[in-house]
Image: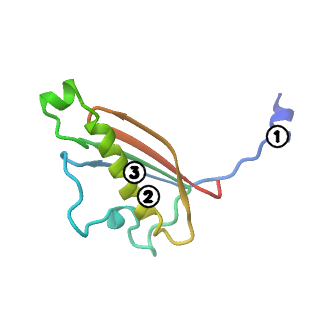
Amino acid sequence: MRKSIKEISTSRSISMFCGTFNLCGDILGKGETLDPWLLGDEAEVPRPDVVVLAMQEIVDLNAMNVVLDGGHTAERVVYWNQQISESLKRVPGASYTLVSCDKMVGVALFVYMTNEM
């Protein structure tokens, strides 16, 4: 088995950026972006191969949203995916694709990978 694994696979080191953000049910203000968080200082932050972001309280956690949700969480997931994707487009020398996204009432998890992976 070990021999066949080496014949059909390769391995390499990868870099990851993992972050979490409590949004308190809010969205970005006019002109705001996630760039300061996701891009940082180019001299200090290497381009990650994988970006994993957890967002909490993407909707107001009132009783109505928790019990019924009503698709509000899904709408916010679309919104935050757009915001994250726009910032990741500005990472020098990288192109990212959303490879996984999951949600529950008020929380969402996004996983992006470089297209080179």
Q: Quadrant of the N terminus?
A: top right
Residue matched to label 1: 8
As measured in the structure, the alpha-carbon distance from the residue carrying label 3 to the one carrying label 1 is 34 Å
Residue flagged by tag 3: what amino acid is it?
Asn
- Which mark, by number, is residue 81? 3
x and y percentages locating residue 59 in the rendered image: 22, 41
Q: Is mark 2 on a helix, strand or loop?
A: helix
Binning the other alpha carbons within 10 Å of mark 2 as few (below 14), some (14 to 19) or many (20 upward) gives some
Q: In which quarter of the image is residue 110?
A: top left
Q: Nearer the viewer, mark 3 or mark 1?
A: 3
x and y percentages locating residue 61 in the rendered image: 17, 35
* Residue located 23% across and 49% down the image: 23
* Residue located 26% across and 66% down the image: 32
Tell me which label, 3 or 1, sits earlier in the chain: 1
Residue matched to label 2: 85
Horizontal placement of 111 versus 107: left or right?
right
Front residue of 105 and 16: 105
* Residue located 48% across and 68% down the image: 91
Horizontal placement of 65 versus 11: left or right?
left
Horizontal placement of 48 versus 27: left or right?
right
x and y percentages locating residue 67 in the rendered image: 20, 24
